[in-house]
Amino acid sequence: MKYSLILAFCFFLYLMAQGQKINIINIEEMRTISGSSDYCKIDLRPFGDELVNYKYYKINEIKRAIDNKGSNLLPEDLQLPAYQSVNDYVTVQLLKASRTAGSISIDGSISLYNPTEANGGIVKISGFKNRPEINLGPKGVTYSIHYYDKTTLTKKGNIDYVKRQEDINKLPENEKNFASEVNALADGLSYYSEQDLENILFFAVGGDNFKILGFEFEDAKGEKIKPASTTFTNVLYTYYFSEKPDPTMKLVLNVDSPKALTKIPFSVLGAVLP
């Protein structure tokens, strides 16, 4: 019988970095008798006055992670999180520390994202409501973005279900997930009321969808328009507004662009284990 022990220690350590300052919000360890599921999870978040100039961040790499006994905590298949808002934390999963270890240290680098139209971090798309199902992405980019309205989705949903599945199965493997999710959206259209559909915007992102960090909307004067709520998957983004979106509304994409990023090293020293 396998017994496990989860040790969690929540705290708000302010550890100075060589470069960027990092908050250690939480450290959680799990140990099992078999050792097969052991791990050490760390929740990280940057902090500092300079973050007012940035919108998103990403942990680029962790070069070193050791405990105070000298044990290497870096897994061979380390998975690093995607971009996150500077107000939110990310979780990094490392190997377990030695049983007698009291602290860990981490060295790596972080990218801070400050988008503008000039540095390619912001892409504004006008008139998208008049171009349903058409790829709205700029020429030459590795991602695609499509807007879907009620008429387009209804037409798609009226096609025989078996025929739609056959068409999806003929697609290249990297396109099947996109097509399947849009297909599911068409099938689920009946779950929305007519009033809901008046106030909802549906988008689907294909290709290198990790390149798009976030969606925003603005009116013809450049004023931000905030949706009442949002739901999303890896492909589908659904935005609910309190009133019917104006046809002149612009879609504003926050896009991963090298010129919009500032790469900074960080070093967390002696983070106390639970």
Image (tube, rainbow, N blue to C red):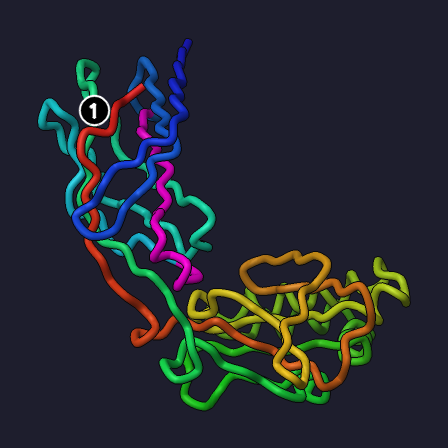
**Could you say where residue 80 lies in the image, as x and y percent from the top left?**
33, 49
Residue 160 rendering spot, x and y as whole percentages: 79, 72
Q: Is residue 257 above or below residue 99?
A: below
Q: Is residue 101 above or below residue 171?
A: above
Number of numbered callouts drawn? 1
Q: Where does residue 273 sit, x and y in percent of width and height?
A: 27, 22
Which quadrant of the view contains residue 66? top left
Q: Secondary structure at mark 1?
A: strand
The residue range painted magenta reads 38-56
Task: Tell me what residue is drawn at x 90 percent, y 67 percent.
Answer: 194
Residue bearing mark 1: 103
The one of 213 and 24 positioned closer to us in this rendering: 24
Furthest residue in direction left, as rendered: 70
The amino acid type, in three-letter code, at marker 1 is: Ser
Classify 56 as above or below 71: below
Mark 1: give few (<14), some (14-19) or many (20+) Cα within 10 Å: some
- Compared across the picture, whether 25 is left or right of 171 comes to left
At horizontal 66% and vertical 68% (from top left) the residue drawn is 182
* Residue drawn where x is 40% and y is 14% of the image: 4
Quarter of the figure with residue 229 = bottom right
Query: For this view, does 16 lie left or right of residue 257?
Result: left
Q: Quadrant of the C terminus?
A: top left
Which of 48/155 is in front? 48
Residue 188 or residue 254, whichever sits in front: 254
The residue lying furthest to the right in this view is 194
Identify the image quadrant of the N terminus: top left
In the displayed structure image, the side of residue 244 where residue 56 appears, left or right: left
Q: Nearer the viewer, residue 160 or 153?
A: 153
Pinpoint residue 241: horizontal percent, then vertical percent.
76, 65
